[in-house]
Image (tube, rainbow, N blue to C red):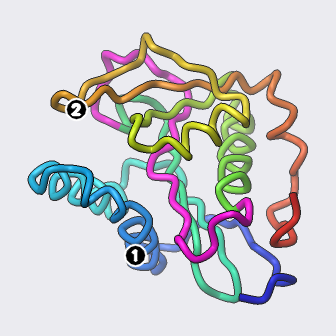
Amino acid sequence: MNTSAEIVIREAKDSDREAIAGVLLGAYSEYASVLPEPYWAEYRDSILDSVHGNAPIARIVAELDGQIIGSVLLFTSSEAAYGKPELGIHTPVIRLLAVSPGVRGRRVAVLLIREAARRSLALGAASLNLHTSDMMASAIKLYERLGFQRASETDIYNGSTLVKGYRLDLPVSSGLQTQETSTAQAGQP
């Protein structure tokens, strides 16, 4: 891909849902070999249900040369994101952050998280939440580098798998708030 091309971060259109599903399945398919088949099938179906459902308040995509290369879904609460009001998360939750394998390392995930944080701030939220598991070690490193802290009080189990809660306190996360525009030069740190 052209390294001088601009990555555009924007709200997805309804017509983008199939492309988003393709990015998600392409990115998450690496876990198909790690998870037992029934768990992978359930996870895959959950991904597709989230893409095609109406629960997210925002579907944010990254686009390069007219192609969707990344996405993240933003929900208003743990109830909207997971159907779990008992988690007590009443601020935005991101789910299904994904970047096409061929463009990883170009800060696409950072741009998507920044946009989700910006939108959360615009909603008046004091924090942004997410859940992940240890099998997503590189994602965890990214989240921690961006200032997300463990929120173990929001941990959940999916079968025997611990799904760890993380929270980013928005007022003190100036590193995420420095990018106010919705575009960035690809390849810049």
Q: Which mark is residue 172?
A: none
Q: Residue at x 45, y 30 (%)?
A: 77
**Mark 1 vs 2: CB contact within 8 A:** no
The three-letter code of the residue at mark 1 reads Gly
Q: CA distance from mark 1 to mark 2?
A: 24 Å
Is 101 included in the stretch rendered in magenta? yes
User: Can you identify the residue that label 1 sits on?
Assistant: 22
In this image, 96 relative to 66: left or right?
left
Q: Nearer the viewer, residue 128 or 99?
A: 99
In this image, 124 relative to 149: left or right?
right
Q: Residue at x 69, y 63 (%)?
A: 105
Earlier-in-chain disc, 1 versus 2: 1
User: Can you identify the residue that label 2 sits on?
Assistant: 158
Is 1 included in the stretch rendered in magenta? no
Q: Which residues are magenta?
A: 82-107
Q: Is residue 153 above or below residue 79?
A: above
- Residue 3, position as x, y percentages in the image: 81, 82
Which part of the image, by quadrant, shows the C terminus?
A: bottom right
Q: Residue at x 84, y 40 (%)?
A: 177
